[in-house]
Image: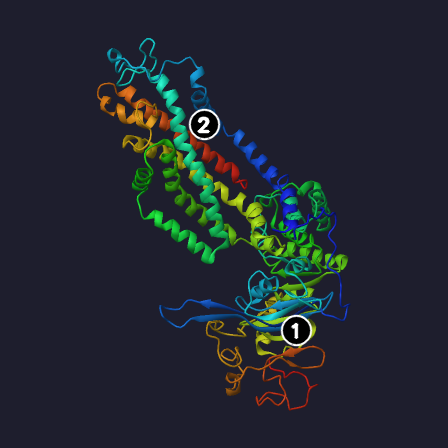
Amino acid sequence: MSAITELALQAAPAGPARGYWATVGRRVVRDKVSIACAVILLAIFLSALLAPWLGLADPYHGSMIRRLKPIGTTNYPLGTDELGRDMLARLIYGGRLSLLIGILPVILAFMIGTSLGLIAGYVGGKVNTAIMRTIDVFYAFPSVLLAIAISGALGAGITNSIVSLTVVFMPQITRVAESVTTGVRNMDFVEAARASGADAFTIMRVHMLGNVLGPIFVYATGLISVSMILAAGLSFLGLGTKPPEPEWGLMLNTLRTAIYVNPWVAALPGAMIFAVSICFNLLSDGMRSAMDIRN
Amino acid sequence: MSEIIEPIDKLEPIEDIGGVAQPLLRVDGLTKHFPVRGAWFGAAKTVRAVDDVSFSIAKGETVGIVGESGCGKSTTARLLMHLMPRNAGDIIYDGRQVGRELSLRELRRGMQMVFQDSYASLNPRLTIEESIAFGPKVHGMADAASRHLARELLGKVGLRPENFANRYPHEISGGQRQRVNIARALALSPRLVILDEAVSALDKSVEAQVLNLLVDLKREFGLTYLFISHDLNVVRYISDRVLVMYLGEVVELGPVDSVWDQPAHPYTQALLAAMPSSDPDNRTQVPPISGDPPNPIDPPAGCRFHTRCPFAEPLCGGATPKLTELDGLGHQAACYMAIPGSGHSRAPAARDLHSEAPALS
């Protein structure tokens, strides 16, 4: 890369980045739904993070005589599970793994997929064909099957679950990124940027990224809930989290048998997954309209 | 280029090398063919979008390019800007061949372009100031200096910087956006500006304002324009010389008054006759030309216009007529009727170079 370009790179962030994102930030803050979702997510994140210091019961300590207590039992505000363990403690501790497995693969896939899609869409031609046809190979398998196959090949464990889920989501995000990039790439302002002598990297960073990130971001946040469900499925098959580790997906599976005995308690892990994913979806909707500064 | 260059505060324009006598831009045999995928296993076909186009632009003049949609006007502009690869042809900027004596990067500073769609040609995510400052920054200008330059240029194109610098493109009107695009093109201190239908999408009143702005800027910055348009009135108003294109070829070129008053090519005559008159008693009653332009995938042999030409003779379907000087003043046309002794029944007698173009209409 030429020295002049490096210079331009150093000079740029203070300019375009601040101006645009500050505007987006102001618009998000004005949106009440987005703020509510952000607060709920923050509360769930913080409680998961600070679980050991919240004075909760031991999430691993069970008791056969206190199994499946209903919500509201003394000392067990959210009841107990099928092994008599405190549901409140398990839900809060469970957030640690569930959020990790739900979000980390999507973040990784977002970074890899956006880069690949941006390159494929901007460079086009043979590079596009090479990247997109390789991606198509992954599409040949149903995502659940692919996750199971990769996890099975790599062996059980949380790290391997994260790797396999990243591989599952990466092609989907790449495809969205590629199609959005192709649309933006043909706009006159990209031609004008090329006519000003900017190199491909600078054009992608200054002119493409801001215009493609919104739709990809919205799509990716929608994948977080899918990721949590898939992770639960892997755990259920013995490929992800193992009992007695608290994890929402796994808890949903183990409590499944108690659905007729104590439906409210059995539904709690599902409610957590639901709350987190709907908050992410609403937040991403809010982000999308905030990023569309034309309105 | 690994050494770090200090951010500069001012971009010097590309220096004038050849003086006034040397054309600022010389285009020689410019050709662009687009491959078209035919049927399976069918022969590959090509669209001859621009076919052997040659012309030159003198320093300080405004050259207009006219022609109907699909005649290769915009492709020519993009080829000159090196936004797409060409099949053949030399582009020589102030005596220096682009790619050899003149790097592409330098050419970008010497030649800039304003696009037709004022909205699509501005990044919706950048403020106006950032859009204008982008080019100078790419060429090594410091952030603060480039922003200062952007504000200065906003003033030059008639937009108060304090009101417009921090706006986004969607917040301003089409005319204002096109002013921003002009400022953006000027930010690199170019000597040649290509205006590709730059005023065509604007309201008539706004169009007039922007045209006057272009005239003023040309005087202030000593610019040279290549003005592409389908609006013949606008081209006559702003141009010194004009090129008429048909199906990727130049059919007539010359000083705008001479071409307008004595069009030599029947296509030019038809174009001018098709101009709507502002006088209601003087409406065009009979269409001067009928039919659509032939498919550029398979252009007719010989003169490309002969399929629609009212004066076509067997000769016209044979060899392609060459651009021929008519009056010794730079007025050229590629028509057998204008070539003395060509064999066309309406052609002037041989060696009668100074006769007037045949009156046809």
Task: Report helix, strand or loop for mark 1.
Answer: helix
Name the image quarter holding residue B211: bottom right
Q: Amino acid at mark 2?
A: Cys
- Is residue A188 left or right of B10 when viewed as pictured? left
Instruction: Give the letter of the chain under mark 2.
Output: A
Q: Residues within 10 Å of mark 2 (few under 14, many from 20)?
A: many
Residue A108 percent coordinates (x, y): 44, 38
Residue A45 percent coordinates (x, y): 45, 24
Name the image quarter holding residue B320: bottom right
- The residue at the point 39 percent across, 49 percent down is A135
In the displayed structure, B148 sits above or below A221; it is below
Residue A121 percent coordinates (x, y): 47, 52
Q: Amino acid at mark 1?
A: Trp
Q: Mark 2 highlights which residue?
A: A37
Say whether residue A278 is visible: no
Say whether residue A96 is visible: yes
Instruction: Give the camera-side residue of A165 and B166.
Output: A165
Instruction: Give the camera-side residue of A62 and B166.
Output: A62
In the displayed structure, B313 sits above or below B200; it is below
- The colour scheme used to paint the residues is rainbow
Residue A187 percent coordinates (x, y): 53, 53
Disc 2 and disc 1: Cα gap in Å? 67 Å
Q: Is mark 2 in CB contact (under 8 Å) with mark 1? A: no
Q: Mark 1 highlights which residue?
A: B260
